[in-house]
Image (tube, rainbow, N blue to C red):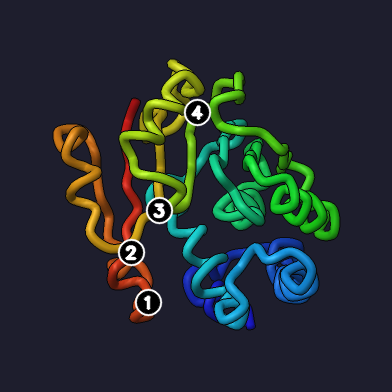
Amino acid sequence: MIDIILKYFPNLSVEQQQQITALDALYRDWNAKINVISRKDIDNLYEHHVLHSMAIARMVNFRPGTTILDFGTGGGFPGIPLAILFPDCQFKLIDGTGKKIRVAQEVCNAINLNNCQPEHLRGEDEKGRYDFIVSRAVMPLPDLVKIVRKNIRRESRNALPNGILCLKGGNVEGELQPFRKIAETAHLSQWFSEEWFHEKHVIYLPL
């Protein structure tokens, strides 16, 4: 099942591989109780959710000590796969829907993912400061920027200056318009050959 992950991330440790392998049964079990992934899509967990989340790691290799806020994480994407990939970084996962955060918390507990802190919280109420904000198609970029600008730390510690890393699908030209001079867009098809990634992007916005 996790072959598609190992195809693109072949250097995972045994522990990382075990954590990723465990996600399938965990999400199937929780999804039957609390719908965090479309029922039709659960069979595509590794391609459409885990690998999709890990695309952010192709844009930036977070240095140890980096802090990341996953805004609108739902059941834990992209935060949980990224926290598995970067065990020396700290992730906070927030969502306004309590039952979804419960799923993320239970998954973290089950795989001993200690660098990941899910919390039931609206973005407007998050007070902390982070190196990066990550999100997956939560809301239009201009709306996201308004909410999270306050949460980005000034001093950068990575090769990429601090900012937002956002996974999006389809046509993003409209929402990029206000940021066209500073935003960078990468097509996921340059990294992943599966057809599903052809219309998918990661947008980086330094703030």
Q: In which quarter of the view is residue 35 placed? A: bottom right
What residue is shown with label 3?
A: 167
Count residues near mark 2 (Cα–Cα under 10 Å), then give few for <14, some for 14-19, many for 20+. many
Residue 159 visible? The answer is: no
Q: Quadrant of residue 124?
A: top right
Disc on the earlier residue, 4 or 2: 4
What secondary structure is marked by label 3? strand
Residue wearing tag 1: 196
Split into 4 quadrants, where in the image is the N terminus? Answer: bottom right
Per the model, the C-alpha gap separating discs 3 and 1 is 14 Å
Seen in the picture, residue 114 relative to 23 is either above or below; the reply is above
The reply to whether discs 3 and 1 touch (Cβ–Cβ < 8 Å) is no
Residue 134 appears at what percent x and percent y? 48, 42
Q: Residues within 10 Å of mark 1 (few under 14, many from 20)?
A: few
Q: In this orientation, which residue lies closer to the viewer: 115 or 100?
A: 100
Residue at horizontal 71%, vertical 75%? 24
What percent of the width, then of the height, locates residue 127? 60, 19
User: Residue at the spot x=85%, y=59% of the render?
Assistant: 110
Q: Secondary structure at mark 2?
A: strand
The secondary structure type at the circle numbered 4 is: loop
Of marks 3 and 4, the one in the foreground: 3
Looking at the picture, tell me which residue is in the foreground, 132 or 10. 132
Find the distance from the CA under tag 4 to the CA under tag 2.
24 Å
Structural crowding at the residue carrying mark 3, measured as other residues with C-alpha within 10 Å and reported as few (<14), some (14–19) or many (≥20): many
Q: Amino acid at mark 3?
A: Leu
Q: Mark 1–mark 2 contact, CB under 8 Å?
A: yes
The residues tagged by marks 1 and 2 sit, at their Cα atoms, a distance apart of 8 Å
Q: How many marks?
A: 4
Which residue was labeled with disc 4?
A: 131
Q: Badges 3 and 2: C-beta atoms under 8 Å apart? A: yes
At a point 56% along the width and 44% down the height, the residue shown is 72
User: Type of residue at label 2?
Assistant: Lys
